[in-house]
Image (cartoon, rainbow, N blue to C red):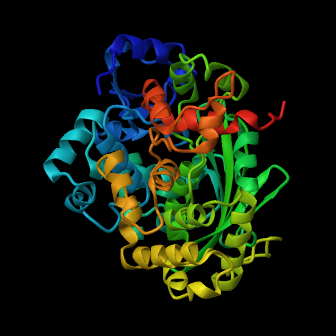
């Protein structure tokens, strides 16, 4: 990615917060890389170079600043809109795609060659896939050291390092000191109890938290999710281990995330899921500037600045929700999901006091596949579709992995029994995080764009109209869905 050095230096000189997360500055005289908002004295122009990502600065030999803490920068996707392959690769890396596999394996999952993937990463991120994964581990570990009181052995495990030795060697090489010295140098802002950790995840403002919380609340599955006050809580399961996450607004454009889990090594995956569900990588001002060019969308964007597209915690769970919701209301679908949880879900097992309303984790595909469709309180066709879907996912858990293109993703999903075009686009929007996914056959979208005489566009007309909204059609869809929902103001 090309960066205009003159513009970058102006951003650094003025500590322009608009560029926070968009670029990082490496200082040659110190070997440190910083955010553009770093409070340290601005270095001379001839002593700095600029990078599009923290991984690029890391690969160039710089170590992260202890003052501005690059690990707390907004997760801005410098690649968004330039390479869908890189976007999908980053999503897989965030979910641990290189923790137990190599670059060749990652490339195969994306349907490209290893050399092509490396070239795309260098072009768009200025770093290799391995450097991106390594930087991810280092920055998660550094944030845990600064913001928690976890023992260093648990920090190493929770940040994805394969061993304590490698963790210590990496920090000694980067900072010329052991990890524990960084904790003494930084302020510990949160306390933790056994099996619990709290972190702050930064986003690019504005953020419509009320709409996000409302969307999740009306769809909360009994026993698995709940909203209490201004906080959202739910249960999760990873490889047989359970966790409870609590997300609430923090200070200074952050979400405050508390995770209680039986396995700290799952923390990077959980944090990645939180970022995806709450759409923390979005740049709402850039999206609004593009979509507001359509006069019908402009007032909706003004009414809800910072509206995000809610992601999903698990592809299979979302697909089950979508099948249950066919031809019934959201409320009825939630009730059916609650029945499945109570019938097939495993009882929650995490350390600490129980959370009111959270009792189970969502059932596995294998468990739902074993059900007799005739015992389910729904039409036979939908029950059969549900168990067939579960059997397919149980046989191939990678069904919901990122594909090469949106069309590839939709085609793969439509091959599943019970998944039509609308459902496939909806899953692509929320699980695959496809910003351009668009369920053109949705009745709500057609109703929202009805003319003064009440005439609604048909799916083909809606599809044509939405062409001008690319590559942010998913955000346009959400604004249209929320058009009739009262705002909190």
Q: Is residue 427 visible?
A: yes
Relative image position of residue 477 (x, y in whole percent): 57, 37
**Residue under the point 57% across and 24% down:** 288
**Residue under the point 74% across and 77% down:** 359
**Residue under the point 43% across and 29% down:** 464
Above or below 175: residue 313: below
Query: In the picture, which quadrant includes the C terminus?
Result: top right
Relative image position of residue 88 (x, y in whole percent): 36, 48
In this rendered view, identify the residue nearer to me: 410 or 236: 410
**Residue under the point 23% across and 40% down:** 120
Relative image position of residue 48 (x, y in whole percent): 35, 21
Query: In the picture, which quadrant includes the N terminus?
Result: top left
Relative image position of residue 158 (x, y in whole percent): 51, 65
In this rendered view, identify the residue nearer to me: 85 or 323: 323
Left or right, residue 485 beside residue 469: right
Give the total of numbered labels.
0
In this rendered view, identify the residue nearer to me: 96 or 334: 334
- Residue 376: name its quadrant: bottom right
Left or right, residue 37 beside residue 415: right
- Residue 414: name its quadrant: bottom left
Left or right, residue 112 beside residue 438: left
Above or below 299: residue 86: below
Q: Is residue 177 visible?
A: no
């Amino acid at each position: 990615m090309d960066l205009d050095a003159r513009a970058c230096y102006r951003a650094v000189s003025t500590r322009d917060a608009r560029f926070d997360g968009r670029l990082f500055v490496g200082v040659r005289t110190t070997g440190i890389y910083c955010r553009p908002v770093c409070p340290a004295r601005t270095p001379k122009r001839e002593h700095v170079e600029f990078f599009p990502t923290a991984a690029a600065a890391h690969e160039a030999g710089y170590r992260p600043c202890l003052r501005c803490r690059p690990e707390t920068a907004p997760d801005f996707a410098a690649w968004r809109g330039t390479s869908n392959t890189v976007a999908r690769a980053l999503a897989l890396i965030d979910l641990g795609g290189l923790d137990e596999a190599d670059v060749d394996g990652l490339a195969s999952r994306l349907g490209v060659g290893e050399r092509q993937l490396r070239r795309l990463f260098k072009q768009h991120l200025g770093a290799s896939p391995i450097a991106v994964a390594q930087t991810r581990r280092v920055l998660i570990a550094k944030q845990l050291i600064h913001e928690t009181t976890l023992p260093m052995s648990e920090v190493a495990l929770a940040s994805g390092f394969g061993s304590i030795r490698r963790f210590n060697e990496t920090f000694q090489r980067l900072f010329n000191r052991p990890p524990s010295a960084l904790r003494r140098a930084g302020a510990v802002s949160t306390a933790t109890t056994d099996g619990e950790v709290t972190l702050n995840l930064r986003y690019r403002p504005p953020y419509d938290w009320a709409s996000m919380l409302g969307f999740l609340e009306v769809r909360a599955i009994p026993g698995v999710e709940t909203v209490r006050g201004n906080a959202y809580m739910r249960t999760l399961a990873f490889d047989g281990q359970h966790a409870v996450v609590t997300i609430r607004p923090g200070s200074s454009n952050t979400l405050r995330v508390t995770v209680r889990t039986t396995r700290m090594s799952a923390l990077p995956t959980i944090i990645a899921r939180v970022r995806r569900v709450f759409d923390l990588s979005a740049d709402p001002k850039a999206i609004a500037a593009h979509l507001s060019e359509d006069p019908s969308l402009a007032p909706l964007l003004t009414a809800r600045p910072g509206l995000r597209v809610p992601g999903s915690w698990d592809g299979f769970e979302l697909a089950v929700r979508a099948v249950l919701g066919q031809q019934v209301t959201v409320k009825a679908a939630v009730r059916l999901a609650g029945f499945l949880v109570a019938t097939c879900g495993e009882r929650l097992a995490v350390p600490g006091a129980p959370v009111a309303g959270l009792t189970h984790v969502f059932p596995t595909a294998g468990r739902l596949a074993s059900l007799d469709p005739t015992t389910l309180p729904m039409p036979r066709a939908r029950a059969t579709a549900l168990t067939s879907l579960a059997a397919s996912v149980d046989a191939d858990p990678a069904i919901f992995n990122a594909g090469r293109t949106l069309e590839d993703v939709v085609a793969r999903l439509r091959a599943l029994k019970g998944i039509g075009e609308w459902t496939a686009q909806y899953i692509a929007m929320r699980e695959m995080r496809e910003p351009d996914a668009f369920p053109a056959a949705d009745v709500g979208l057609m109703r929202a764009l009805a003319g003064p005489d009440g005439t609604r566009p048909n799916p083909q007309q809606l599809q044509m109209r939405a062409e001008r909204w690319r590559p942010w059609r998913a955000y346009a869809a959400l604004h249209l869905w929320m058009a009739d929902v009262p705002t909190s103001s």
